[in-house]
Amino acid sequence: MKILVCMSNVPDTTTKIRFTQENRKFDSTGVQWIINPWDELALTRALQMKEDPAQSIEKITVINVGTAHTEPTLRKALAIGADDAIRIDAEPADAYFVAGQIAGVVKQKEFDIILCGIESSDYNGSTVGGMLAEFLEIPSVSAISSLRIENNEVLINRDIDGGREELTIPVPFVGIVQKGIAKEPRIPAMRGIMMARQKPMEIFQPVDIQILTKTTGFESLPPKEPCKMIEPENIKDLINLLQNEAKVI
Amino acid sequence: MLRGASLQKKIINIYMSVLVFTENWDGKFKKLSFELASYASSVAGKLGITTTALSIGKVEEDELKKLANFGVSKIIDIRNDKLIRLDNQVYTQVISTVAEREKATVVVISNNNTGKAIAPRLSVKLKAGIVSGVTGLPVSLEPMVIRKKVFSGKAYSLVEIKTPVKILTLSQNSYELVPRDLDSVIESFSPDYDTGVIKTTVKSVQKQTGKVILTDAEIVVSGGRGMKSPDHWAPLEELAELLGAGLACSRPVSDEGWRSHEEHAGQTGKIIAPNLYMAFGISGAIQHLAGVSSSKYIVAVNTDKDAPIFEAADYGIVGDAHKVLPELIKEIKAAKSS
């Protein structure tokens, strides 16, 4: 089986978020870019599956929609262990555009399992995976917390609202993964970094996809009131605040 | 000029409603469905059109009528045993059929697991621009611009939807219930759909019983590494039970296997927005705050006065959670009985 892992290139979580051009553009000055944390979990799980011969994974490809500045993120994925990479050379304008671009490539190549993180830590849309599946007219399973192949059958656990479901699904499908799918992401070793330079990276030109939404500006969060400190011996004061000021209990 | 104006009028007349996709639990609506109905009706009010609700599953008339209390004037009632199980592709077909039938210009769906599974597919099917995880009404209608949190809660973005049909997914517990008593009509409907797309086979379903579902909870009690051991969770459980709260934990706690990953609140875990979030022994790493900072009030108890959690908190106690918890439980019991 062949796995495709879709990746977003996002600012490191600890980055201070700033904007330029009168809050119309994200200020990328000094920003450290990383693989979106959920996509990294998806890649980690894909690698674990490939290392287990019983799951018979032939190849892991990573894909990203982005300009050349996102290549280090794809190289990092190769250094961690992906076999090859695809970059679609375009600014990721909105989720519909990104999903449409990836669908265009998937139609030309064959993949059995397409994995997406449930969300990206920049625009927090949670939409690309589902859109991609609809573009491809194939099933999608979201909120996956465990994924394995047993006797050529794909077994999935997923969270539903208020519970959990175990299911099987034939390939091809889009798997949208969340926390639980893998634990710690992997750190590339020196050997991996050296090998990554030799691994293939294919560049695709974008196809014509309409943009349905446009980010027109950004706003900072309103400043927060400082925390009211309560002495541990005055718990009653806290109860009083929660009951009469916050009115939450 | 005249032609343009009449054309525009025609376009406006094509769309007649805001459609809200409701969810029920064994025939009873969850609170989120009333939040969705309230939100959809507010959007409809601004647009000068009406709100239609879609209900799939066996919901009795009395229960359906409750939607009218939150501004719904028409309820599309689809009772089909085959549709009880949620299949993303079938639900996408059914909702898009209803959206077209009801001439919906805005479709409102929850941003929960169900919504996240369906809404993106619907966006492609209807070629409707989507903004997910909204927490408030549009800031403008023509063009439609919505504010939403981005960068894991560190800023807002303003997003314009360029398509005539729009999808908004609403974050849970972010929109107040707005009572609006309307007369409503219930219309039974049996849509056509292709069952051939159902490819998944469900082997087992485990429903959480007896516990408050974390993403639904109005109060959440949460423990971090400062609790020191999984054996120390009893007071947190007692407090949660006392307050009718959900239980959460920080990432190290779930990574260590002290608690199930389902309880992990944080950037890569569950993003929650309860009215009250109580953090015990949680230092407040930026990844944790990304998942809980939308809570309306945060209480933090931590031994380290410099812990970042106090920057996010509204009320703080510098102290040992093990000593504070029993006192807190005692005082809440006393306050409740008085």
Image (spheres, rainbow, N blue to C red):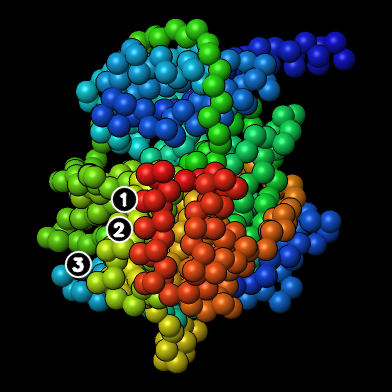
Q: Of the residues shown, which amino acid type is indicated by label 2?
A: Glu
Subunit that carries the residue with mark 2: B
How far apart, in angstroms, are the residues tagged by discs 3 and 1?
A: 43 Å
Q: Amino acid at mark 1?
A: Glu
- Residue sitting at 71 percent across and 69 percent down? A28
Q: Which residue is mark 2?
A: B237
Residue A209: give x, y in percent of width and height: 60, 44
- Of circles 2 and 3, the one toward us is 2
Q: Of B280 and A89, which appears nearest the observer?
A: B280
Q: Which residue is mark 1?
A: B241
Identify the image quadrant of the N terminus of chain B. top right
Read off the chain for label 1: B
Q: Are marks 2 and 3 on the same chain?
A: no
Expressed as whole percent of the image width and height from the top left, the position of residue B115 reads: 43, 39
Residue at position x 20%, y 50% from top?
A166
Give the residue at the far left of this rendering. Answer: A151
Q: Nearer the viewer, residue B277 or A147?
A: B277
Q: Quadrant of residue A111?
A: bottom left
Q: Which mark is drawn over residue A55?
A: 3
| Displayed quadrant of residue A155 | bottom left
